[in-house]
Amino acid sequence: MLSTDLRANVLVVRVEEKRIDASKAPSFKDEMARCIDAGQNQIVLDLSQVDFIDSSGLGALVSCLKRLGPRGSLAVAGATGAVSRLFTLTRMDRVFALHPNVDSAVEQLSA
Amino acid sequence: MVSSISLSIDSDLDKVSLLARAVRALCEDLLSPEDQDAVELSLVEAINNVIKHGYHGERGKDVQVAVGLQADLVVIEVIDHAPPMPAQVLDKAPEDTFAFDETDLADIPEGGMGLALIRMNMDEVEYHSNEAENRLRMVKRIGSSASGG
């Protein structure tokens, strides 16, 4: 469900599903864990293809953040509509740096 | 004008999105896109809770959803035959769930957010339980964008 692209030292992970819900959250978490365990610690998560995230999906994002630990960064790019509102409603917009697009997120992380 | 429809799925997380999209489509003419998002998310959270916590992930159990469309409100009921939700879950204030310390990784929640999200997204939420069934009743008023409480 993920495709990846390494830009400078930043791994851009694009979610190729429209929904990250309770049925998809476990495989999302597993695929992200593989990226993190392979040593990537500057990650941009591209959510531009995603139009729905539930609390299980959001919990999976938080678990990635915890797996990265304080040494890493996980930025979110391209969240719109219901997805972007979910971050605000749950105050997770304070936890994840939200960027309008991948370019600005990569720029921020590689600076 | 009142119309109502009942839908049901097997207790399988893979089937939740199908039902949620069907209910969203039913509300399309009545609710703004933001309110459709609120209803879809609340319904998904309610059904996920039933499947994950009520039926402990076991498939082959029944999850029913009744949708009532009225002139001024949309009523969604999720009916199950699992053990009821414990009182301490229901008593927790939704705002407490998201009052975490964002500077402390360990304090950021990975779960337990579903019911809080339902309460923040719907105008009324009631839970009734008897020997026959559990019934979560959620109401979205048409034209109200207010939420919380």
Image (tube, coloured by chain):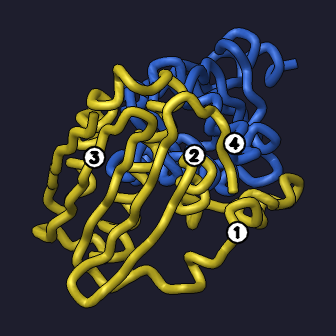
Q: Secondary structure at mark 2?
A: helix
Name which residue type carries label 4: Leu
Q: Mark 1 and 4 residues: CB-CB less than 8 Å, in contact?
A: no
Q: Looking at the rendering, in which quadrant would you find the C terminus of chain A?
A: top right
Q: Secondary structure at mark 1?
A: loop
Q: Is residue B131 visible?
A: yes
- Disc sitting over residue A89 in the figure: 4
Q: Secondary structure at mark 3?
A: strand
Q: CA distance from mark 1 to mark 2?
A: 14 Å
Q: CA distance from mark 1 to mark 3?
A: 26 Å
Name which residue type carries label 3: Val
Q: Evaluate whether label 1 is on the same chain as label 3.
A: yes
Q: Is residue B22 left or right of residue A69?
A: left
Q: Mark 2 and 4 residues: CB-CB less than 8 Å, in contact?
A: yes
Q: CA distance from mark 4 to mark 3?
A: 25 Å
Q: CA distance from mark 3 to mark 2?
A: 17 Å
Per the rendering, the colour in which chain B appears is: yellow
Crowding at label 2, few (<14), some or many (≥20) Cα neighbours within 10 Å? many
Q: Secondary structure at mark 4?
A: helix
Q: Which chain does the residue under circle 3 lie in?
A: B
What residue would you read off at disc 3?
B67
Front residue of this view, candidates B54 and A65: B54
